[in-house]
Image (cartoon, helix red, strand yellow):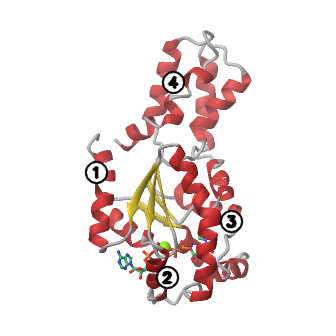
């Protein structure tokens, strides 16, 4: 079911003509190949975006409870790195305290590790990507293992089709690039976000008015372009994040329920 939604993604379906070098491959080959792709366990990825205090984490808990996703909070993974006193710990702590963005390679590595070790392939990636640089770094992740890839390569070889090297590379990119299937954007007025963060009470180093002011600026300058990028691609579901937790979840529920409906 989730796979079926993934296979409907515009990236896969609209790429058919450009990948297959006109006339060189038979339709049958494409048909077999796409069936193979569709039956592979591709992850279903939801990015959960919104300003600080907009309620991302709170709504993720409800989505997990109701729809059984694996919740990956980028902020929690970074805080776990600080707590484990890893080599990047102090750099991450200073970056969070300043309300800035941790270098992409650090965050992407943490997310990728969690994704690869999870049996659940339905992911809620909360609070990431926070910049265009984050987004691009994530999209370069190979979500397939090397053995998957070599199996696919030999499949390509087995066929009698001729595929130009560039086309083959494009095809591999489609098979392996990590793209969100959908993006939730919790839209919340700044005043409300400030109020929520200042009463969050979780002992976070960034839950103070100075860091919060910086975070709101970073949100507008760096996070907003990511939301715009996915909006232009029709992937964003904008949720009005004002109201009770349950009221907000009633806007979220139908988005996932409609995916479940095509099980
Ligand atoms: N709809 C809501 N109304 C009031 N407070 C909320 C609501 N949703 C979340 N909160 C509270 O606001 C704070 C920030 O929520 P959180 O889920 O941590 O946001 P984010 O992950 O976007 O920063 C938390 O203390 C949470 O309990
Ligand atoms: O992809 C990420 C996610 C978080 N952070 C850092 O971690 C902080 C807290 O992020 P979190 O998502 O936990 O904050 P929330 O929006 O939930 O308040 C951010 O301000 C950033 O400094 C980051 O650098 N990259
Ligand atoms: Mg959060």
Q: Is mark 2 within 8 Å of ligand 1?
A: no
Q: Which residue is mark 4?
A: 33
Q: Nearer the viewer, mark 2 or mark 4?
A: 2
Name the residue: 60% across, 66% down. Answer: 220
Residue 172 in which image quadrant: top right
- Give the mark nearest the N terminus, 4 or 1: 4
How crowded pointer 3 is (Cα within 10 Å; few <14, some 14-19, many 20+) is rated as few
Q: Disc 2 and disc 1: Cα gap in Å?
A: 31 Å
Residue 126 percent across, percent down from the top left: 49, 64
Q: Nearer the viewer, mark 1 or mark 3?
A: 1
Which corner quadrant holds the C terminus? top left
Q: Nearer the viewer, residue 167 or 219?
A: 219
Residue 104 percent across, percent down from the top left: 69, 62
Q: Which residue is mark 3?
A: 106
97 versus 162 height, above or below = below
- Give the mark nearest the N terminus, 3 or 4: 4
Are discs 3 and 4 less than 8 Å apart at CB? no
Say left or right for 47 vs 109: left
Q: Which residue is mark 1?
A: 257
Q: Disc 3 and disc 2: Cα gap in Å?
A: 28 Å
């Amino acid at each position: 079911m989730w796979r079926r939604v993934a296979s409907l993604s515009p990236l896969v379906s609209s790429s058919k003509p450009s990948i297959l070098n006109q006339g060189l491959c038979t339709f049958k080959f494409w048909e077999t190949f796409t069936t193979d792709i569709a039956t592979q366990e591709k992850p279903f990825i939801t990015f959960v975006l919104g300003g600080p205090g907009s309620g991302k984490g709170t709504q993720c808990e409800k989505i997990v409870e109701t729809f059984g996703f694996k919740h990956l909070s980028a902020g929690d993974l970074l805080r776990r790195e600080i707590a484990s006193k890893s080599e990047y710990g102090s750099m991450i702590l200073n970056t969070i305290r300043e309300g800035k963005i941790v270098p992409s390679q650090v965050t992407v590595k943490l997310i990728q590790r969690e994704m690869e070790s999870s049996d659940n392939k339905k992911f809620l990636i909360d609070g990431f990507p926070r910049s265009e640089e984050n987004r691009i770094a994530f999209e370069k992740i190979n979500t397939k293992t090397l053995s998957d890839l070599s199996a696919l390569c030999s499949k390509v070889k087995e066929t009698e089709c001729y595929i130009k090297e560039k086309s083959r590379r494009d095809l591999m990119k489609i098979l392996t690039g990590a793209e969100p299937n959908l993006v939730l954007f919790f839209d919340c007025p700044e005043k409300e976000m400030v109020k929520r963060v200042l009463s969050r009470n979780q002992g976070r180093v960034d839950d103070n008015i100075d860091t919060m002011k910086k975070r709101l600026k970073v949100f507008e300058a760096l996070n907003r372009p990511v939301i715009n990028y996915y909006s232009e691609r029709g992937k964003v579901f904008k949720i009005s994040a004002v109201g009770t937790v349950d009221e907000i979840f009633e806007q979220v529920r139908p988005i996932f329920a409609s995916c479940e409906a095509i099980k």
